[in-house]
Amino acid sequence: MRKLILILTLFSTLLVGCSVIPLAKPTLTTSEMATKVALLLTAMPTATGDQAALPSTDQNLPLSTAMPLPDEIGVLATPTTEGESGLITPTTDETAFAAFLGETSTPEVAPSVTISAATATPPITMPSATPTATIPPTLTPGGTPMPASMITATFTASDPRSLLPVATWTDTMDTGKNWPIGADAFTAIDFQNGYMVLTGLQKDNGWRLAIDKVDNTYIEVTGKFGITCHGMDKWGIMLRSPDLSKADQGYWFNVTCDGKFAFQKWNANPPDKEKAVTNLIAWTSNSNIKPGGNAPNRLGVLAKGNHFTFYINGSQIAEWTDGSYSTGGFGVLVGARETDRLNVYIDEMSYWLNPPM
């Protein structure tokens, strides 16, 4: 029995001396845990990929296998999205950091820069193989909408608009589908904001004809000069031009900036002893014409056979008989007699075939 007790005593002594049974390691406190995390962050790999050695003060610190307490979980960095480094740059108290460095000035903050697509350099448009040369009109701010009084006008009983049904054809000038667009030696034409903008490029008369031919008809056009016009600058209606491709003949009913009207016959190749332009009704002042720039006027011509009746703003002003041209194309003309690059704004043009007048 005594021999058994001695053997047990020796065996127990050997176990304790050899540390076979490990002692329980102490659990880290909150302060020790924070110190350990800071040391681990300090020992992250360097830029070359080498592992930095732990400080010597860390070599003998006991390791804890205990989970952090619930109130300590919030100090852990939230992982970034997949593909990023997984490290979060800590937020620095700039005031405290400046005090640590011994600085007293307020840290400089870089301005925020916003890159907008509108500031980007636009792509360079390559020219076409065969560019077409055009002369764009110089537009003045005269292309303002017609006054409401013109749109909602109450016509008098003798006004053709009170006597006629719905027009056979009307162009409100929203597009240029009925007209040749571009520039030639005499005029330039464009369509903007519900207007035809007809620009006279020379002192001679210039015109644009629509796509139709008419004979017995009432034609009416509403338009105005731009802001700037002078004296004998003119615009008006061209009608009964027999050859649309040449437009070398026809009649002109036009008004001037200073309030005159005339009815003229045009023939580019006149007979002997006849002028190219013949004044059938010579230039005459009329109080129905609104003179000056940006003043809208409504011109109308009733052409039945060889008889013509003329209207301005709904009032009949004259009549004439001439049988030179019985049918043909119609359009708008401009004469920049005193103003360089004279602009005329046409708001609407209509015609009525075989009108009951």
Image (cartoon, grey):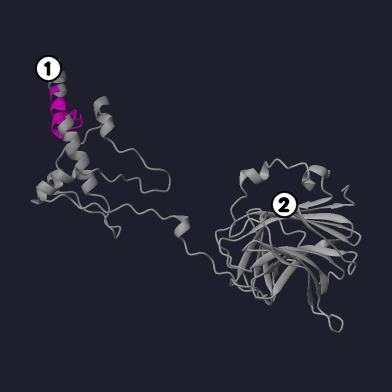
Residue 1 in picture, x, y percent from top left:
15, 15
Magenta stretch? 9-28
Name the residue tied to disc 2.
Answer: 172
Q: Secondary structure at mark 1?
A: helix
Q: Residues within 10 Å of mark 1 (few under 14, many from 20)?
A: few
Residue 59 appears in the figure: no
Residue 37 visible to the viewer: yes
Task: Indicate yes or no whether the magenta region holds residue 212.
Answer: no
Considering depth in this image, is 215 or 28 the residue closer to the camera?
215
Q: Relative to residue 220, is residue 73 depicted above or below?
A: above
Query: Which residue in the protein does label 1 denote?
Result: 2
Type of amino acid under label 1: Arg
- Gap in angstroms between the C-alphas marked 1 and 2: 130 Å
In this picture, residue 334 sits left or right of residue 170? left
Side of 302 relative to 83 (left or right): right
Choose between 150 and 79: the one closer to the eye.
150
Residue 256, image quadrant:
bottom right
